[in-house]
Image (spheres, grey):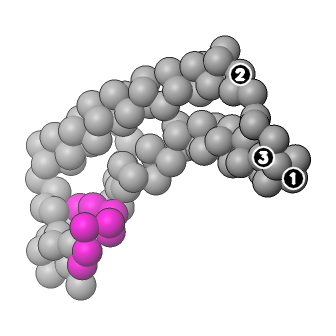
Amino acid sequence: MLKRDEIVTFSAKSAWFIWVSPLCMYFSLLLFKYLLTKKQVVFNNKIGSVFGLLAVIGFVFNLFFSFYVDFKLKNENYITCAKSSWIAPNKYVKDISLCK
């Protein structure tokens, strides 16, 4: 069995970035090509569709995975600390005094 630390930090937003980054890079390359040539850029439907599908699958996976992590850690008696902002990662601790 895995032994966890007293403090566990988890960010679903950074995991989501892994799934959506290919789509962002594809659109960035299209924009870069347009800025260089000043001509209409042809959108490759196959590549765009694959990256879009990858982003949707990643979003669904990440949504369920973040709920699973939250459920699993709370079942192991971890407490969620208050977040400093909405974008801050979730911090789970065994003892409330570890929240700083």
Q: Position of residue 2 (x, y in %)?
A: 38, 42
Q: Determine crowd level at label 2: few under 14, some 14-19, many 20+ residues with C-alpha closer than 10 A.
A: few
Q: Amino acid at mark 1?
A: Leu
Based on the picture, tell me whether residue 87 belongs to the magenta stretch: yes
The crowd level at tag 3 (other Cα within 10 Å; few <14, some 14-19, many 20+) is: some
44 left or right, relative to 93: right
Find numbered disc 1 in the image and state the secondary structure of the residue it sits on. Answer: helix
Q: Is residue 7 above or below residue 49?
A: below
Distance of label 1 from label 3 (alpha carbons): 5 Å
Q: Are marks 1 and 3 in contact (CB under 8 Å)?
A: yes
Checking the image for residue 36, the label placed there is 1
In percent of width and height, residue 62 lies at 36, 36
Q: Secondary structure at mark 3?
A: helix
Q: CA distance from mark 2 to mark 3?
A: 14 Å
State the residue in front, 22 or 4.
Answer: 22
Residue visible at 15% across and 73% down in the picture: 82
Is 73 situated above or below 81?
above
State the residue position of label 2. Answer: 44
Mark nearer the viewer, 1 or 2? 1
The residue singled out by tag 3 in the image is: 34
Of residues 97 and 83, which is closer to you in this image? 83
Q: Give the image quarter of residue 10.
A: bottom left
Residue at 68% in and 38% down: 26
Q: Which residues are magenta?
A: 84-92
Q: Are marks 2 and 3 in contact (CB under 8 Å)?
A: no
Residue 94, label in figure: none
Residue that appears at 17% across and 70% down: 81
Residue 94 in sight: no
Q: Amino acid at mark 2?
A: Asn
Residue 43 vs residue 52: left or right?
Answer: right
Circle 1 residues within 10 Å: few <14, some 14–19, many ≥20: few
Q: Quadrant of the N terminus?
A: top left
